[in-house]
Amino acid sequence: MVKRQSKSLFDVAAKAGVSHQTVSRVLNNHKNVSAKTRESVEKALNELNYRPNSAARALVTGVTSTIGVLCFDTTFYGPASMLHGVQVAALENSYDVKFYGVQESIFENLIDGIKNLTSNGIDGLIIMVPQLDEKILKSKFLAGIPLVIVGGSGSVNASSVAIDQYLGARLATKHLIELGHKNISHLYGPLNWSDAKHRNEGWLAEMKNNNLSVTSIAAGDWTAKSGYLAGLKLLTHQKVTAVFAANDAMALGLYQAAEELGLKVPADISIVGFDNSPESEYFRPALTTVNQDFSATGQQGLELLIQRINGESLARQHRMISPELLVRGSTAPRSAKKRG
């Protein structure tokens, strides 16, 4: 007696006139399947009496309904929020997520992460790190893996979605200039981070565009403590009337330094942050800051990745999301008093 061979995903796909990836999406209740296609696939499933076996299906088709995320292991608000945005978008599209965090974005760490994620079975990969060595994209471990870079500087060699850090910095600096400030300091983050580098470049470009000299800058490490220590130096310069801080945490440190130096925000010193962290609205005064839409970044990154997984869009795409300046109480017109 010959044992009856069970029907495969490919049999269902052939009967329905669709790809096996589409059959997999129907089985996993993905949202991005039209009602007509879903009906056709479900009819074929019933007629063939198909009984899915998830483990076997993954082995046969390579479809796991899982994406990998190679990310920077940090609690800083910006990167953590962007990571959360990707995770929410993945779950909304019925994808499981496997994470691999690195402490440093060096070549060896990134390769280890890619090997770990790809060896465990993923349909596609999102990379979210502060710096990306272009050699990574040529790794044999990425061969055939749909890939999207989210955040950071992106790459011409892979599809990417990022928030325009350069534009955000120009908006912040322009706001201060329009208030009459001329001596505007910048408290920048670690310049080996692409976000910090682009914010610094945006501040510098806006200053030069308005023929303003660049005299006073300071380095921080994204923490409130570094903002405080830098502030004690920056704010002793009598000409400085405004500071653009590269994130909200460092801006908070500036508040503390200003208070200890007997300066009032914004009467004596105007401060702008970056990120729109949840606490920024409750600083006293509320912090003027640059808002980044992390949810949109995650959604668009996941959208691009799904397109590549499904073979719908193989051409590289580079999407840039514009930030928004939120004006609150920490900025005011330049005082006619002694500072500046």
Image (cartoon, rainbow, N blue to C red):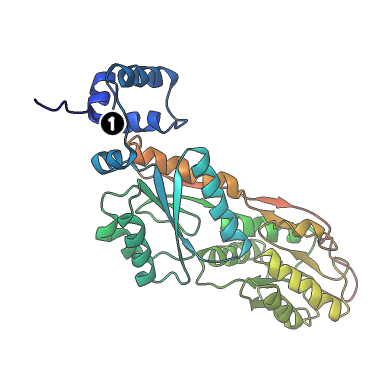
Tell me: residue 188, above or below residue 69.
below
- Circle 1 Cα neighbour tier, 10 Å, few/some/many (<14 / 14–19 / ≥20): some
Q: How many marks?
A: 1
Viewer-proximal residue, 213 or 202?
202
Q: Residue furthest front?
A: 1
Q: On the picture, is 274 further left or further right than 3?
A: right
Residue 310 drawn at (x, y percent):
34, 36
In the image, what residue type sits under mark 1? His
Q: Is residue 257 left or right of residue 30?
A: right
Q: Nearer the viewer, residue 271 or 2?
A: 2
Q: Is residue 256 visible?
A: yes
**Residue 72 point in image, percent of width and height:** 49, 64
On the image, the x and y values in percent for residue 44 come to 30, 19
Task: Report x, y in % for residue 160.
Answer: 44, 50
Q: Residue most toward the left?
A: 1
Q: Residue at x 77, y 66 (%)?
A: 271
315 vs 142: above or below:
above
> Can residue 243 be seen?
no
Q: Residue furthest right?
A: 337
- Looking at the rendering, in which quadrant would you find the C terminus? bottom right
Determine which quarter of the picture holds residue 176: bottom right
Q: Give the residue pinned by disc 1.
A: 20
**Residue for point 47% across, 38% down:** 94
Looking at the image, which is closer to me, 215 or 139?
139
**Element under disc 1:** helix
Residue at the (9%, 26%) spot, across then down = 2
Quadrant where the N terminus sits is top left
